[in-house]
Every structure is written in C-alpha cells, then in structure tokens.
Amino acid sequence: MHRWLLRSSLLLITVSATLAATALPATACGEDDGPHGVAARLTGSPGAEKNVKAVGNVPGAQGAISLQFLQYGARDVMVVSGEFGLKTYDLTANPAAPKLIGQLNMPGMWETEDTEVDPVRKRVFLSRDPRAFNGNVRTGESGVYVVDLTKPEQPTVLSYVKVPAGHTTTCINDCQYLWTGGPAKADSMPAAWGGRPIWVTDVRDPRKPKVNPNPIELARNDGQTDYVHDVQVDETGIAWASGRGGVRGYWTTGMHQDPVTGKLRMASANDPVPYAGGGIKETAAPSKFMHNSFRPIGNRAKDGGGAGPFADGNLIYATEESFVDGCAGDGVLVIASLAGSYGGEGWRSTPQKPYRLNTVGTWGVAGQEGSDPASADCSAHYFDVQDKILVQSFYAQGTRFLDVSDPTNPKQIAYYRPADAAAWAPYWHRGFVYVADNTRGIDILQLTR
C-alpha cells in the first residue's frame, strides 16, 4: 500500500480542523510491513475493461482507503475514510452521483483500512496506524477514533483512545467492542513477536472507551505471536482473524466447547472460544500473510458439521497480500476448506508439526486478460462477494469480477482497469460496485454481463 508521511497533528480532531500535510510514498502492509516497489501511476498501458460500465466517479475522494454505507430511513449515505479523514455522501437521489454532505478533516490520517460503522447507533470507528501524522511503526502512536454520524452532515469525534494496535479495527458483538490489530510490532513490544496481535476495546460508552491491556489471538503463526491484519465477522457471528499464519475463527458470545481444552465455557469479546481455521498452505500463499477473509454461509449448518469440504460454511476465502519482484509472485486470492480444523488443530500447530488448511482453489491477476504487463503492482487486496460473484481490488491491475460458483476454479468474467488505477477495496451496493481507489477517488461500476 501507499503510506504518506505527514506533519504531526492534534490527537483529537474536530470537524473544522484543517492540518497541513505533505505526501511521500512508502509502504505495504504485507510480509514484512516494509517498502515495496510501487508501480508508476501511469504505466503507459491505455487501461482495459470488459463487461463493466463505469457509471460514475468521485474525484474529490482521492486518497480513499475504505468506505461503508448507512441508512437513515429512506436516506442512503456513503461513508468514505482515507488520508483526508472522513467524508459523507448522499446517494439517495442518484447512487451514481454521490453528493458530498459532510467532512471530518484529518489530513495525514492512516490507515483506516476496512473502516466499520455501527448501523444502529450511527457511529464509525477509524483506526489510527502508528504511521499516521508523520509517525512510524517502531515508535508511532496508534489508536481508535469513535465518530458520531447521527447527523451525517456533521461528523463529530466522540472520543479517541490510544490502543497498542491500530492498522484495522472491527466491530464485535454488535459494535459493543472493537478488535484492533496490526501493523508490525513496536520497539516496546516483545522481541519474539512477529507483529501486533489483537487488543479489545469496550465501546459501550463511546465517550469513554476502555482498552483491555491483555491482547488476544496470540501464538497464531505455528506458536509465534504475529501480525493480525484484519478481522471479518460472518453471518453466524464468528470473528475471523487474518494475518501472518493464516485465518482463525472465534465465537465471541454464548456457551461453547473449547476444542483446544475440551471444556465448555462462555465466549466473550475479551475471551473468545476457538472455532476453526489455521494456516494456509505455503504452496498457495508463500508469504503466509493473509490480509482479510470471508466465510460464505448460505444454507450451511452453523456448527461446521454434516456437509462436504467444498460446501458453503466449510470454505474460507482469504487474500494473500504480498509484493515480490515482478508480478507473477504477488499475493493471490485463496479458497481453502475448513474441514478438519474444527478440533482446534490450528491452535496446536508448531514448526515441527505444522497444520495447514487444504487449498481448494486460487486466483491471481498476473497474466490474466485485461492485465497490464508493464505493471509490477499485482497483489490481491480487499474483496466483496454477492451471489457467487466475487469482486476484488488488485491495486494497479484494477477491479476484477470472478465467478466463484465452482470454488475449485474461479473464473474472471469482467474487469475494470483504468490506466491510473490504484484500486484498494470494492463494495457491492444497490446493484453497483463502489471502488475505493487511492488515486482516482471512488469509481462506481455496473456489471453488464
């Protein structure tokens, strides 16, 4: 990804604050969380598209990293986070022509990846990476801003709390708690750690968040505590933590048998119960760094039993984010089976006796139709799934639409790659796909196939 080194800022930032900034490209959040060769904004290729119609663009959202949607009765609002802070757009009248209605100016903000909203209480949670506001991974400050969007025209910071992690933050148990992870470890953290795990924050009182000092999701990489990049919660409420060492899922409410200890115990956000998951085979993801994930449920039973290894509920989709020289070895989409991992196998994995999920299928953009052979910026990034159509961002290689009805053989059915693409995250919404493009702002696409 692209980092921007900027002037220091106040910790609490009001709606009207305007802070000067300068921009310098820098890092990826992949294997070593260090710099990678970023492809030029314009590679010389004229761009390419197939079976996709670009119906709109929001250039005023340049620097976009993530977006979400909130409903206010019949009113439809898009919430965009990025290097500028936060912007809100009204989509009600015309979803292809978003209208800017509110802004929280935080120039120099980083990272706000996979920003999440509370759809009931109308709040948004912005993760502050230690590299924000001219900081660095080793010594910079990280934390979470809780922003009130009761009035989308007036985003208001309710609180800011320092958290030892800050690359991403995720709603747990209906946004009563947050799980915050990443990036690489700070100088003050144990030398044996490979990266930051997860810290839990109680946000039931949004003006006084309380951070649990004891991190969770430890020993995730064959027994080593390592970088947890992001967390996604599936339809059943299971929280899937992705990072170096694979993807592992947890119950965060209710009474469950712990497959690691064999004991029946109550799950909570601060003390979750392992469910399933584990490492991804190195033949599929050599870096072992899994960026984000998705577990399709469909009609599948919620307890993980009774269906084949390729059935919905027994699959986990995950993205490897990794940058190497050239393009062919960059991170790919991986589909793996959870079958065989429901007994705590992923928590007992060691270097001597590693446990890995079985790979079902993979897909990478290198050499695919519509790709730019002049670009070396090909890693997979965020994706979204609707009706067996997976849409995924591949940075300079743009947005790709894949038919995953056969998980063993994902097939590209459409693509949209502007010559200046820096696609970070796509989102299905109201029949369109909204792409957070760090260079272009928001691209609004319609699948025409």
Image (tube, helix red, strand yellow):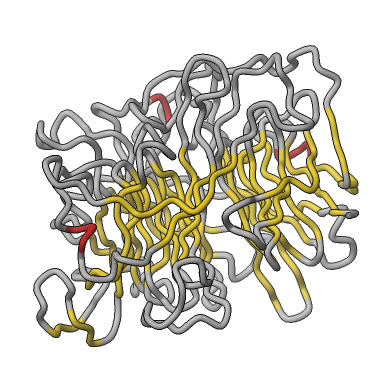
Total of numbered circles in the picture? 0
Q: Nearer the viewer, residue 62 or 238?
A: 238
| Residue 116 in view in this figure | yes
Where does the image place residue 79, in percent across and percent down from the top left?
64, 56
Q: Position of residue 410 (x, y in %)?
A: 64, 50
Residue 440 position by quadrant: top right
Residue 208 can be seen in this image: no
Position above or below: 187 against 26: below
* Left or right: 308 in relation to 349: right
316 on left or right of 120: left
Residue 42, compared with residue 93, is above or below; it is: above
Which of the 4 image quarters holds residue 245?
top left
Placement of the C terminus among the 4 image quadrants: bottom right
Q: Residue at x 32, y 60 (%)?
A: 277
Given residues 184 and 402, the one toward you in this image is 402
What is the x, y in percent for residue 55?
90, 48
List x then y, in percent, for residue 104: 59, 48
Question: Residue at 28% across / 62% down in the picture?
Answer: 201
| Closer to the camera in the image, 341 or 414 | 341
Residue at image point 44% right, 55% down:
336
